[in-house]
């Protein structure tokens, strides 16, 4: 059984566009097919207020990459004389987490939402703390003008925990779903 | 045991209230003996009116379930909070005022809404449609036109499900429901007193039935702009849909079919009854000391008959498929019982103009543009029917204080028509600004959510849609018509 791939979070200080250009250029030039993600483009939460501001201002980028590719990019960047970006901190990622909540108002949509949330989870992803509350209020059946209450409400919350690519795939799956509200992805770094 | 304690507490509360407010109101009462009630009533007597309007605005957002189960009690509490001290102090004069507003306004108002709701709820549109930009725009256009004839609630109820069905396969459909609220549930209702409750209240108070056609240019501009924007917006989102979503319905096809069409006859009967009451004047009768015009009693009778005929002749299945229940009418009946009770001091004070406790408000709104925006902004957050009456009375108090109401309204139309246009358009159009601005808005939102459309939050609706599409349109209307 092969070891699961480890992932790195690499802080690149400098113009964001150069960071994207460098990472994409390295991948294309080296023929590397492993996926690489940018935290700012993938709704990944960056701890630290100033880091978030710098990322918004495109002064700092957080790249998430498989460890071998990440190390190779760091090493290659050290040899560059033209680029204005430099490697800041590097963290090894232990696991990723994605919390969500949802609220739906009819049984058919509820079934579809639960299917999206619970069935066919990406490899290496499990669901934790999944709680569901179902409320049925027969007195609220039919339309209301001034006192709107749904006669059926299924609400719930939970979180996915697992590998970086698995959690990112899950985030992609939830991104376009109505009634499901995912949080930002949290990366748990190795202490 | 518990019930008995609760009743004692309630009675004790009102007794205490009468004792607490009696001195102040009694002093006002002495001053009012034989004089204008509006000039004597203190400003704080409108607190229950503000309270019930704020309850309608805030409870659905902060405590919807509590509100759903207890709104009749809350409405009654606000009504009694005003009525008990009012009757204690002003005795027969207070009783007369209360009976006056219930007999002349509340009962006809409820009868009209009930009749329109019953008849519109008996018509059902079936069919499998493909929600293309052209079809959606046609739906909204038709809804805008018929809203003035079946009421905004009736038009919304009739068309919202076909619109949702037509767009079921589309990923981008929230904007369609929002523009449906703008046009069908609000702006479309501006051309007749049947269209929107504020205009019917205006009709009951003496605005001629066909006067509302005088705002056809304003409505045409607003509806035209919004329909064009909607079409372009929908075209943009249509191009982003998947091929599968753009394909015609692949299930068993159902042709367009309108069931319960005979209800149009009853709709004609309602229109005829309302028109009759505006043209035929056989005299008055006295009911519990209140003078009521015979034509209004005949009108209400015709409306009741039309509603009953619709109930008897319409298949049960049609109403079931429309999701029809009586609950919306019960909501209106309970809440407006409270609104009409508590609005008594507000209307009286405003009618007193410079002599009333709201003289500051009367002085502050001077021009049509002020009336358009003041009526509109308040109608965005409070129910637009009482808001319309409030500003109509502000205008009457400003120009014709002390004049009999019908005479004053005719004078307002003759000499200051732009003010009435500003009040009417402000009340009807700007009910679309928020979910709480007009009754059908919440109904449409709720039906959409129960059919798998995730609607924006209260603030999301305002920030993403009202502020972007409606407010600039209303600013344009201001410059074109009210400056």
Image (cartoon, rainbow, N blue to C red):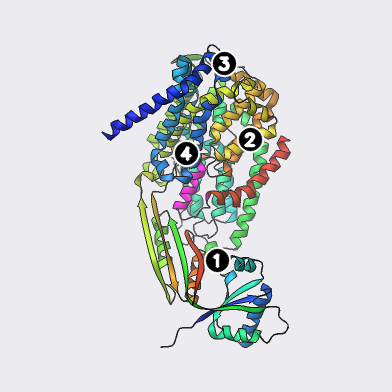
Q: Quick one: label 1, few (<14), some, or many (20+) residues within 10 Å? A: few
Task: Pick whichever, B109 or B434, lies toward us.
Answer: B434
At a point 36% along the width and 27% down the height, the residue shown is B12
Give the label on residue A126, or none: none
Pointer 3 and pointer 1 on the same chain: yes
Give the label on residue B120, or none: 4
User: Does the magenta stretch mainly form a helix, a strand or a loop?
Assistant: helix
Q: Earlier in the sequence, mark 3 or mark 4?
A: 3
Question: How far apart are the two marked residues, 3 and 4, measured between alpha carbons?
Answer: 42 Å
* Quadrant of the drawing holding the N terminus of chain B: top left
Give the label on residue B243, or none: 1
* Chain part drawn in magenta: B439-457
Which residue is disc 3 drawn over? B36
Q: Would you identify the image quadrant in which residue B473 lies?
A: top right
Q: Chain of mark 3?
A: B
Residue A108 shown in magenta: no
């Amino acid at each position: 059984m092969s070891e699961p791939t480890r992932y790195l979070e690499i802080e690149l200080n400098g113009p964001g566009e150069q960071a994207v250009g460098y990472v994409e250029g390295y991948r294309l030039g080296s023929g590397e097919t492993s996926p690489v993600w940018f935290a700012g483009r993938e709704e990944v939460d960056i701890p630290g207020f100033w880091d978030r501001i710098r990322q918004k201002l495109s002064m700092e980028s957080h790249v998430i990459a498989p460890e071998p590719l990440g190390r190779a990019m760091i090493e290659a960047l050290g040899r560059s004389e033209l680029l204005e970006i430099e490697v800041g901190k590097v963290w090894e990622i232990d696991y990723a987490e994605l919390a969500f909540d949802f609220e739906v108002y009819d049984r058919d949509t509820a079934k579809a939402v639960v299917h999206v949330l619970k069935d066919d989870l990406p490899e290496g992803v499990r669901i934790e703390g999944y709680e569901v509350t179902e409320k049925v209020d027969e007195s609220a059946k039919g339309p209301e003008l001034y006192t709107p209450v749904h006669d059926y409400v299924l609400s719930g919350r939970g979180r996915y925990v697992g590998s970086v690519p698995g959690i990112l795939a899950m985030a992609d799956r939830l991104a376009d779903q109505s009634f499901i509200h995912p949080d930002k992805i949290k990366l748990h770094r190795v202490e | 045991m518990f019930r008995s304690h609760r009743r004692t507490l309630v009675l004790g509360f009102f007794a205490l209230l009468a004792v607490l407010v009696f001195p102040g109101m009694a002093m006002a009462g002495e001053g009012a003996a034989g004089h204008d009630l509006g000039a004597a009533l203190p400003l704080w007597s409108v607190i229950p009116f503000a309270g019930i309007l704020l309850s309608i605005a805030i409870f659905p957002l902060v405590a919807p379930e509590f509100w759903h189960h207890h709104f009749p009690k809350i409405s009654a509490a606000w009504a009694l909070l005003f009525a008990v001290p009012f009757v204690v102090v002003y005795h027969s004069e207070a009783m007369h005022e209360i009976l006056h507003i219930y007999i002349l306004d509340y009962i006809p108002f409820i009868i009209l809404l009930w009749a329109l709701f019953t008849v519109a709820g008996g018509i059902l549109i079936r069919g499998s449609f493909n929600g293309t930009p052209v079809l959606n725009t046609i739906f909204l256009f038709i809804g805008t036109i018929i809203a003035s004839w079946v009421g905004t609630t009736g038009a919304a109820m009739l068309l919202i499900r076909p619109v949702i069905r037509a767009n079921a396969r589309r990923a981008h459909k929230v904007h369609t429901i929002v523009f449906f609220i703008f046009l069908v549930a609000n702006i479309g209702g501006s051309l007749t007193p049947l269209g929107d409750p504020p205009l019917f209240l205006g009709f009951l108070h003496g605005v001629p039935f066909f006067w509302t056609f005088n705002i056809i240019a304003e409505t045409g501009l607003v509806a035209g702009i919004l329909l064009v924007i909607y079409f372009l917006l929908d075209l943009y989102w249509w191009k982003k849909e998947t091929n599968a979503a753009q394909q015609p319905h692949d299930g068993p096809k159902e042709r367009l079919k309108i069931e319960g069409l005979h209800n149009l006859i009853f709709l004609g009967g309602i229109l005829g009854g309302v028109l009759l009451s505006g043209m035929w004047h056989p005299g008055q009768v006295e009911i519990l000391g209140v003078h009521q015009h015979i034509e209004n009693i005949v009108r209400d009778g015709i409306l009741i008959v039309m509603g009953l005929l619709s109930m008897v002749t319409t298949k049960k299945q049609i109403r079931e498929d429309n999701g029809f229940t009586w609950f919306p009418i019960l909501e209106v009946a309970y809440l407006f019982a409270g609104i009409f009770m508590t609005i008594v001091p507000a209307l009286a004070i405003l009618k007193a103009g410079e002599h009333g406790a709201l003289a500051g408000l009367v002085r502050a709104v001077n021009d049509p543009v002020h009336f358009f925006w003041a009526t509109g902004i308040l109608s965005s957050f409070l129910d637009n029917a009482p808001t319309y009456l409030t500003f109509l009375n502000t205008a009457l108090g400003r120009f014709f204080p002390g004049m009999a109401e019908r005479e004053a309204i005719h004078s307002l139309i003759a000499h200051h028509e732009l003010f009435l246009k500003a009040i009417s358009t402000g009340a009807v159009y700007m009910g679309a600004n928020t979910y709480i601005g007009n009754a059908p808005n919440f109904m449409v939102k709720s039906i959409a959510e129960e059919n798998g459309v995730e609607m924006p939050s209260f603030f999301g609706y305002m920030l993403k849609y009202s502020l972007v599409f409606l407010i600039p349109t209303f600013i344009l209307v201001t410059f074109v018509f009210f400056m």
